[in-house]
Structures are given as structure tokens and as C-alpha cells.
Image (cartoon, helix red, strand yellow):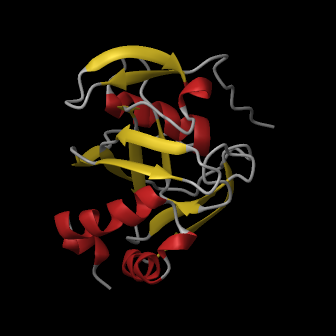
Amino acid sequence: MRTHPRPATEQVVLVDADGSPIGEADKTTVHTKDTPLHLAFSCHLFNQEGQILVTRRALTKQTWPGVWTNSFCGHPTPGEDAANAVIRRAHQELGICITAPGLALPDFRYRAQDASGIVENEICPVFTAVLDRDPDPVPREVCQWRWTDPAALLEAVTAAPWAFSPWLVLQLPLLAAADPGLFAS
């Protein structure tokens, strides 16, 4: 059985409104009802057939448990390049190796509050990559996954935004506008 080690403590980079680093904090202490602005990233994976990978967050996740979302997301560690963080997290969360993720939305940022009151407050560049196999997700991160048509996903997110993570709801239309070819039916 393959194992996916989790770091003992994961540090996130705290930033000011301009995105300049101002400190570090333990990830487990950052996400509260008053979450400071910090760095993150999102990644959307596509397969050779042009389908997009969506994942359902594990029911044990602190924020938005059980919600369908983008392929995966995470936080760069202090001093870590965002693209390298994407590569690292792809392995940690989905058991996959990706190379050369493309930066699709460099200036994406959002603030959202889940039903429990926990706030996400992130400067969150959005990446895309192509995957040539199915993921092997870690159960503590992902409880379900599926490949789907990007145009159908965009339609579902528009029709029922409450069923998806707020960052996916915000990112998907921006990705479609930035690269309409990815979302053509």
C-alpha cells in the first residue's frame, strides 16, 4: 500500500494586501473566523481527452468538507516557488506526478466564509496541467473524484454554486474567459 506522508507542521506565508510576505504561521492555526491574508494556489487538471478533474473534499476537512472543488489546492511553504508547491501538492494529495504546471490566473484572490464560520482569505494563483492517468487520492484529502466535461462543469457551477467550493465558483468562469478552447463543448 502506498503511503502519503504529511509534514509534521505545515507553514503558510502571511502577506500584506500587496502580496508581500510579512510572516509565517502554522497552517492549523491560520484558518479561523478571522483568517489573515496568506498565499495559496489552485490547480485544475485536464486529461488527454480535454476533460477536467473535479474532486470532492474529504468529510474531515476543516473548511468546506464534502464540497466538490477544483482538482487540488494548497499553500506554498516559506521560500517555495508556487509552481514547485503545485508539483509537491499534486503528489501529496492525489498521488500523481505533474511537470511544468502552467500559470493561468496569476492575480486570483478571494475571501470566503464556510457554514461553520471558518474564513479563507487567500492570494491564490491558479495553475493548469495535463494528467495522463487517473489520480490515486489520499482519503484524508479527497473522498471522491471524477473527470467531467469543462463546459458541463461551468454550467453546473453557474446553476448551483452552493454545491461547489467558492474558489471553484469564482475561478471557473475566469479560466473559461482566459482560454475558451478548454471549455468548448
Judging depth in this view, the residue of 47 and 17 nearest the camera is 17
Above-or-below relation of 132 to 7? below
Name the residue: 24% across, 31% down: 17
Above-or-below relation of 129 to 82? below
Judging depth in this view, the residue of 142 and 99 nearest the camera is 142
Of the 4 image quadrants, the one containing the N terminus is top right
Judging depth in this view, the residue of 162 and 131 nearest the camera is 162
Of the 4 image quadrants, the one containing the C terminus is bottom left
Above-or-below relation of 72 to 148? above
Instruction: Give coordinates of residue 146: x percent, y percent.
Output: 59, 68
Instruction: Give coordinates of residue 136: x percent, y percent.
Output: 65, 49
Is residue 62 visible in the rendered image? The answer is yes
Instruction: Give coordinates of residue 111: x percent, y percent.
Output: 39, 48
Is residue 79 visible in the rendered image? The answer is no
Name the residue: 70% across, 52% down: 58
Judging depth in this view, the residue of 108 and 72 nearest the camera is 108
Instruction: Give coordinates of residue 87: x percent, y percent.
Output: 43, 35
